[in-house]
C-alpha cells in the first residue's frame, strides 16, 4: 500500500473510532507497515499510572515495568528534549546525544537491551490539551537504515492525528473549543506544505511571492497556536480545515509527491 494511502486509511479509522484503544491498534498496524516496531505517544508521565493523561504505547512490558518502578519519566532525556523543542529529532543525532547526562545515558543503555533504540521523536504541543503537560510521540524502527524519509513524514501526520483524536475523545464532555478558521490562501499553502513543498515552490504554483507564502503559513501557525509548519498541518487536518485528499491533490505546476513503498 502507498504510504499516503496508509495514512489516509489511518485517519479515516480515527474519525470512526469510539475508543482510544482502537486508534492505538490502527496506529500500530500502520507503523508496522512502514517498518517501525515500537511506539509511545502521549504525555510525559508514568506509563503505568497516567491518571487522566493520554498515554499509548507498545513497548516491551518488562521495560515499561522497570521504567515505571524507577520513575524514569522524571529524567527521561527524550522527554526533556521534546519539552524544549518544537522540531522532531533522532536519538542518534549529535544534538541529542551531547545533551544527555550520565544518569540518562545509563537509562538509554538499559532501554537498548529491550530493543528501544535509534528512535525518532516528534514533540506535540497541542492547543486541545487540557493539561499543563508536555507530550510527544516516539517511534522505534526495525532497521533504521531501511526507513525511507517519506515514512518519517507519514508518521508525523499520523502521530499528530492520533493525539488530537485521542484528546477529542477524552474531552468529549468538556466545553467546546472555538475552532480557528483559515483563509483560502492559508489552506492552499498548508496543502502544499503537506506535499513537502518549499515556500519558493509554493510561490511558483500559486503565483505569489515566497515572502507572501511565508506570511500565510506563519498566520496559520498563529491561528493554531503552534510553532512549526508540520504542527499547523496536523491541526488543519484535525480541525477539518483541509482534508488529506486536499494534501494529495496535484496542482498545475506541481509534481506528484506520492511514492510507492
Image: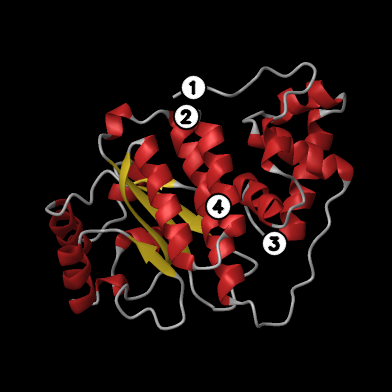
Residue nearer the viewer, 81 or 257: 257
* Dot 1: element: loop
* Dot 2: element: loop
- Place of residue 170 in the rendered image (x, y in percent of width and height, measured from the top left): 56, 75
Binning the other alpha carbons within 10 Å of mark 2 as few (below 14), some (14 to 19) or many (20 upward) gives few
The relative height of residue 251 versus residue 127 in the rendered view (above or below) is above
Which callout, 2 or 1, points at the residue further toward the start of the chain? 2
Q: Is residue 136 left or right of residue 32?
A: right
Residue at position x 18%, y 49% in the image: 115
> Dot 2 corresponds to which residue?
1
> Dot 3 corresponds to which residue?
225
- Point out the frontmost of discs 2 and 1: 2
- Point out the frontmost of discs 3 and 4: 4
- Point out the frontmost of discs 4 and 1: 4
* Dot 3: element: loop
Pointer 4 and pointer 2: residues touching (CB < 8 Å)?
Answer: no
- Place of residue 207 in the rendered image (x, y in percent of width and height, measured from the top left): 87, 23
Q: Is residue 161 left or right of residue 77?
A: right
The number of discs equals 4
* Dot 4: element: helix
> Dot 4 corresponds to which residue?
13
Which callout, 3 or 4, points at the residue further toward the start of the chain? 4
Amino acid at each position: 500500500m502507498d504510504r499516503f494511502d496508509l495514512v489516509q486509511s489511518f485517519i479515516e479509522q480515527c474519525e470512526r473510532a469510539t475508543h482510544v484503544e482502537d486508534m492505538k491498534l490502527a496506529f500500530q498496524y500502520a507503523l508496522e507497515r512502514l517498518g517501525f516496531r515500537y511506539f509511545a505517544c502521549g504525555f510525559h508521565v508514568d506509563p503505568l499510572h497516567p491518571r487522566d493523561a493520554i498515554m499509548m504505547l507498545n513497548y516491551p512490558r518488562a521495560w515499561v515495568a522497570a521504567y515505571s518502578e524507577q520513575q524514569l519519566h522524571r529524567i527521561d532525556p527524550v522527554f526533556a528534549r521534546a519539552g524544549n523543542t518544537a522540531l522532531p529529532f533522532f536519538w542518534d543525532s549529535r544534538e541529542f546525544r551531547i545533551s544527555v547526562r550520565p544518569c540518562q545515558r545509563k537509562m538509554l543503555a538499559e532501554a537498548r537491551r529491550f530493543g528501544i533504540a535509534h528512535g525518532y521523536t516528534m514533540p506535540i504541543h497541542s492547543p486541545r490539551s487540557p493539561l499543563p503537560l508536555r507530550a510527544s510521540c516516539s517511534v522505534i524502527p526495525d532497521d533504521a537504515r531501511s526507513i525511507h524519509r517519506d515514512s518519517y513524514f507519514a508518521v508525523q501526520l499520523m502521530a499528530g492525528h492520533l493525539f488530537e483524536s485521542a484528546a477529542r475523545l477524552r474531552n468529549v464532555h468538556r466545553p467546546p473549543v472555538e475552532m480557528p478558521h483559515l483563509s483560502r490562501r492559508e489552506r492552499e499553502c498548508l496543502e502544499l506544505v503537506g506535499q513537502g513543498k518549499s515556500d519558493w515552490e509554493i510561490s511558483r504554483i500559486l503565483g505569489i511571492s515566497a515572502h507572501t507564502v511565508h506570511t500565510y503559513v506563519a498566520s496559520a501557525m498563529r491561528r493554531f497556536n503552534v510553532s512549526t509548519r508540520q504542527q499547523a498541518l496536523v491541526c488543519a487536518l484535525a480541525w477539518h480545515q483541509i482534508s488529506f485528499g486536499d494534501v494529495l491533490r496535484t496542482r498545475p505546476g506541481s509534481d506528484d509527491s506520492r511514492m510507492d513503498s
